[in-house]
C-alpha cells in the first residue's frame, strides 16, 4: 500500500486546497497520470501519481485544505506496507508534518464509535481534529475544542439552520478554490491592517500624449505600465511603502526588490500576478509582461512563482468602471495603488481636460498619513509629466 | 422472607390452586430437598404429587416431559444444575422442541427448577453456572431471579408459561437476603429486565447471583451506574440493554459463568450490532475464568468488587 502525500510544491507552500479529484476509489492509475488538482497561493497544479496501482482510499473530499505531507490517497501498488525509502524518494523535502499525520501513520483516525457519530452529527471532520487520548485517539473533549484551522471550524447549528432557510430559488455559495483564498486573504488584510486611503486627482493628458507618440512609433502600451513604473520610482523615494509585514515576528521588511503585483480580473476571481524587478525593466518590457501574465492568468496557466513575492500592488479598475475606490492591501504588503477611469470634461474656455482619480491605501501601523500623501503627490507629479520618471 | 421461603410458599400456593401441579425430584419429599425449597409440601399434598425419584436426572426430566404432554403440570427439581447434563438429551431434544416438531400442536408447560452457581463452597460438581447451554437452545425459556420477590413473581409466570422454563436458582442467594414478598399473586413478566439502580455514566448488565455483588460494588464506590438485572436470559430484554447503552455509551457485563461463549459474549455482540455508534469504550466482561470451578480458589473465581471496579474504571477512563 502506498500512501501518497501532498508533496512540497516549493516556494514555501505549506498547504493547498484539493480543487478536483481526477480519480475515484477503485481506479487504476498509471505512473505519472494526473490524479488531483491542488490549489496553492492561487495557482492550481495537477499532481501525478508516482506509482502504478489501484486507488484504494481517497482521504479527503474536494474543497478540503490539506497540509504538505498529509496522505491524500492510498494506492494499492502491491506493496504490503509503505516503504520508508520509497516515500522519501517520492516526496522530497517534506518538512512540515501536520498534526493529522502525527496521530496515525496511515492517515487513519482513531476514535471511538460514539465520537465518530457525534463528529458526524456536528459536521466535524475528524481528520482535522488533534486527538489527545492514548495513541492520539480523538476523545469527546477533543471535539468540543475549536480546531486550529479556521476553515475546519465546525459549522454552528445556527448557521446550519440559516442554510436550511435558503429557498430552492436561491444559490448557496461555498467558499472554494480561488474564492476561498480571496475570502481569507481579504479578511486577514482588513482585520489585521488598519487601512487608510489617500486620493489624488491627476491630469493624464501628457500620459495619453506619450502613449500616442509611442503608438506612432509602432509601440503599443497600455496605461498600467505607466503606473507600475511611476510606482517604482516613488517607492525608491519612499522605501517604507515597499515593505512586507512579518506576522510571526510582528515586524516589517523593507524590500530592495521592486516586484509589482498587478491585480487581474479572471473568470474565477481576482488574482495578482507579479512583475518582478520592475525597476530593471523598460516601460515596453513591463507592458509586454503584463499582457502575457494577464492572458495566462485568465487561462489559469500562471506558475507559482508568478503569483508570489510581490512587494507593492497596482490595481486598475478603471478599464471596467468606477471613478474612485478604496483598495484593500494585498497582505502582507503595506500599500496598494488604485487607478481609475479617465474622466473627460470641457472647461470654461472650451478646452478638453482628461483626469483620473488615484487612491493609495496604506497599513497605518507603519505608514503615516503624511508619508502616504507625499508618495501619492510624487506619483501624481510623475504621471502628469511622464518624461521625468521614465528617464529615471 | 428469603428466596427459599419465597419459592416454597409459591410452590405451596400453585399446588393448592391447581391439582394438576406435580413436583418430582431427588430427596424433595420427606427431606424437603437439599436446600429445603420443597419442605413440608409432601406432607401437605401427598406422595403422589410430591414424588421422591431415584437418582436419574434423565428419568426425572423425561417423565416430566411425558406428564406435561398429558396435561399434568410438572415442576421437576434437579438437585444441582451440575447434574443436569445427564438429562441434556431430554431437555434439548424433547423439552425444547416439542412445540416446534408438533407444528404447535403441543406445548410443554413444565418448569425445570435447579439451583446453580458457586459461593457456598460446593466444589466443582456443585457450583457450575451452565445457563449458556440452555440460552443457546431455541424453544426454552431461561429465567434466573436475583431476589425473593422476583423468585415468586418469576415462578408464577413460569408456571403459567405454555413453554418449558429452565428456572435457575442462584443458590448463594437462597438465604442471602430477606425482603418483603407480598402474599397476593403478582407476576414478574418473562422477558422483562429490571433496573435496580439507575445512572448515566455506565451500564452494568448482570443477572442472578451477581446482582447483589454488582449493586453493592456500585453503591460502595459511588458509581453512577445503570444496573440491568436481566431476570430472563432467553428471550432477553434487548431493548432494556440497548436503551441504557445509548444513554451511557459505556458497558461492563458481569456474570459468574466462564467467559468464553458465555452470556456476556452474546450481550456484547448484541450491543455491537445495535448500538456501536454510541460506545465510547470497549465492552468489558467480568466473568469466571475458563476453568473448572475450583473448590479452594472459589473466592478468586467469583467476580468480586475488586475485579468489577477494575473493569468499570477501565471503561470509564477510556478516552
Image (tube, coloured by chain):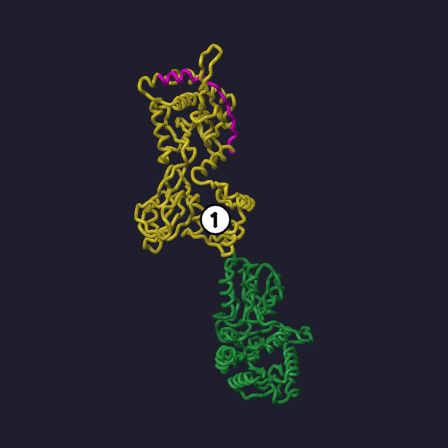
Chain colours: A yellow, B green
- Work out which quarter of the rendered image holds the N terminus of chain B and state it: bottom right
Please name the residue that numbered disc 1 is placed on: A125
- Quarter of the view holding residue B113: bottom right
- Part of the protein shown in magenta: A191-212
Residue A218, compared with residue A136, is above or below; it is above
- How busy is the neighbourhood of tag 1: few (under 14 within 10 Å), some, or many (20 plus)? some
Q: Is residue A82 visible?
A: no
Residue A60, how many percent across, how many down?
42, 48
Q: Is residue A384 visible?
A: yes
The reply, left or right, for residue B182 in relation to residue A263 is: right
Residue A78, compared with residue A148, is above or below; it is below
Residue A217, how many percent across, how many down?
31, 17
The reply, left or right, for residue A215 in relation to residue B195 is: left
Residue A237, compared with residue A166, is above or below; it is above
Which sits in the foreground, A247 or A303? A303
* Residue A237 among magenta residues: no
Which sits in the foreground, A242 or A43? A43
Which sits in the foreground, B66 or B245? B66
- Quarter of the view holding residue A93: top left
For image coordinates 46% across by 20% down, the residue present is: A343
Residue A351, how many percent across, how many down?
45, 12
Chain of the residue under label 1? A
Residue A281, compared with residue B302, is above or below; it is above
Residue B171, how many percent across, how many down?
59, 77
Helix, strand or loop at mark 1: loop
In the picture as drawn, the residue positioned furthest to the top comes out as A349
The reply, left or right, for residue B271 in relation to residue B159 is: left
Amino acid at each position: 500500500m502506498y500512501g501518497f502525500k501532498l508533496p512540497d510544491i516549493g516556494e514555501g507552500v505549506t498547504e493547498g486546497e484539493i480543487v478536483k479529484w481526477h480519480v475515484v476509489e477503485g481506479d487504476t492509475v498509471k505512473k505519472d497520470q494526473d490524479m488531483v488538482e491542488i490549489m496553492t497561493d492561487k495557482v492550481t497544479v495537477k499532481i501525478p501519481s508516482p506509482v502504478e496501482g489501484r486507488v484504494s482510499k481517497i482521504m479527503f473530499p474536494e474543497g478540503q485544505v490539506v497540509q504538505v505531507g498529509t496522505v491524500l490517497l492510498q494506492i494499492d501498488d502491491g506493496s504490503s506496507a509503505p516503504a520508508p525509502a520509497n516515500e522519501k524518494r517520492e516526496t522530497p523535502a517534506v518538512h512540515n508534518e501536520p498534526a493529522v499525520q502525527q496521530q496515525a501513520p496511515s492517515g487513519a483516525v482513531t476514535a471511538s464509535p460514539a465520537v465518530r457519530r457525534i463528529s458526524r452529527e456536528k459536521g466535524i471532520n475528524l481528520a482535522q481534529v488533534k486527538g489527545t487520548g492514548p495513541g492520539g485517539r480523538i476523545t469527546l473533549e477533543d471535539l468540543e475544542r475549536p480546531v486550529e484551522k479556521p476553515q475546519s471550524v465546525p459549522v454552528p447549528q445556527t448557521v446550519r439552520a440559516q442554510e436550511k432557510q435558503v429557498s430552492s430559488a436561491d444559490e448557496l455559495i461555498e467558499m472554494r478554490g480561488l474564492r476561498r483564498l480571496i475570502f481569507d486573504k481579504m479578511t486577514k488584510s482588513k482585520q489585521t491592517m488598519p487601512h487608510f486611503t489617500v486620493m489624488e486627482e491627476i491630469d493624464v493628458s501628457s500620459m495619453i500624449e506619450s502613449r500616442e507618440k509611442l503608438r506612432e512609433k509602432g509601440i503599443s502600451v497600455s496605461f498600467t505600465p505607466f503606473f507600475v513604473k511611476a510606482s517604482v520610482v516613488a517607492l525608491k523615494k519612499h522605501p517604507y511603502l515597499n515593505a512586507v509585514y512579518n506576522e510571526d515576528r510582528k515586524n516589517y521588511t523593507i524590500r530592495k526588490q521592486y516586484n509589482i503585483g498587478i491585480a487581474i480580473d479572471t473568470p474565477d476571481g481576482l488574482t495578482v500576478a507579479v512583475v518582478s524587478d520592475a525597476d530593471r525593466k523598460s516601460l515596453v518590457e513591463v507592458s509586454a509582461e503584463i499582457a502575457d501574465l494577464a492572458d495566462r492568468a485568465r487561462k489559469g496557466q500562471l506558475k507559482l512563482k508568478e503569483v508570489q513575492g510581490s512587494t507593492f500592488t497596482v490595481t486598475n479598475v478603471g478599464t471596467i468602471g468606477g471613478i474612485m475606490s478604496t483598495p484593500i492591501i494585498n497582505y502582507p504588503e503595506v500599500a496598494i495603488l488604485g487607478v481609475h477611469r479617465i474622466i473627460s470634461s470641457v472647461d470654461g474656455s472650451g478646452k478638453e481636460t482628461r483626469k483620473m482619480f488615484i487612491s493609495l491605501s496604506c497599513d497605518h501601523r507603519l505608514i503615516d498619513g503624511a508619508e502616504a500623501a507625499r508618495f501619492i503627490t510624487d506619483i501624481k507629479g510623475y504621471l502628469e509629466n511622464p518624461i521625468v520618471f521614465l528617464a529615471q | 422472607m428469603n428466596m427459599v421461603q419465597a419459592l416454597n410458599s409459591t410452590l405451596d400456593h400453585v399446588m393448592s390452586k391447581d391439582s394438576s401441579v406435580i413436583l418430582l425430584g431427588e430427596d424433595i419429599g420427606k427431606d424437603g430437598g437439599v436446600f429445603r425449597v420443597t419442605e413440608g409440601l409432601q406432607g401437605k399434598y401427598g406422595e403422589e404429587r410430591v414424588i421422591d425419584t431415584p437418582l436419574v436426572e434423565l428419568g426425572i426430566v423425561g417423565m416430566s416431559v411425558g406428564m406435561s404432554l398429558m396435561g399434568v403440570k410438572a415442576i421437576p427439581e434437579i438437585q444441582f444444575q451440575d447434574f443436569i447434563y445427564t438429562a441434556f438429551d431430554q431437555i434439548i431434544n424433547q423439552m425444547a422442541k416439542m412445540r416446534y416438531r408438533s407444528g404447535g400442536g403441543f406445548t410443554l408447560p413444565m418448569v425445570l427448577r435447579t439451583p446453580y452457581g458457586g459461593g457456598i463452597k460446593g466444589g466443582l460438581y456443585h457450583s457450575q453456572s451452565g445457563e449458556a447451554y440452555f440460552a443457546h437452545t431455541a424453544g426454552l425459556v431461561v429465567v434466573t431471579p436475583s431476589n425473593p420477590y422476583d423468585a415468586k413473581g418469576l415462578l408464577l409466570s413460569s408456571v403459567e408459561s405454555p413453554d418449558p422454563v429452565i428456572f435457575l436458582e442462584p443458590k448463594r442467594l437462597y438465604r442471602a437476603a430477606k425482603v418483603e414478598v407480598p402474599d397476593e399473586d403478582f407476576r414478574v413478566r418473562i422477558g422483562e429486565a429490571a433496573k435496580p439502580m439507575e445512572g448515566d455514566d455506565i451500564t452494568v448488565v448482570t443477572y442472578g447471583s451477581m446482582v447483589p455483588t454488582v449493586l453493592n460494588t456500585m453503591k460502595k464506590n459511588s458509581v453512577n451506574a445503570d444496573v440491568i438485572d436481566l431476570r430472563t436470559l432467553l428471550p432477553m430484554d434487548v431493548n432494556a440493554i440497548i436503551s441504557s447503552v445509548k444513554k451511557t455509551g459505556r458497558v461492563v457485563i458481569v456474570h459468574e459463568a466462564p467467559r468464553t461463549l458465555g452470556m456476556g459474549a452474546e450481550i456484547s455482540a448484541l450491543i455491537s450490532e445495535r448500538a456501536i455508534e454510541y460506545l465510547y469504550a470497549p465492552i468489558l466482561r467480568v466473568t469466571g475464568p475458563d476453568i473448572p470451578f475450583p473448590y479452594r480458589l472459589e473466592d478468586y473465581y467469583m467476580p468480586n468488587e475488586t475485579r468489577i471496579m477494575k473493569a468499570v474504571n477501565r471503561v470509564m477512563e477510556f478516552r
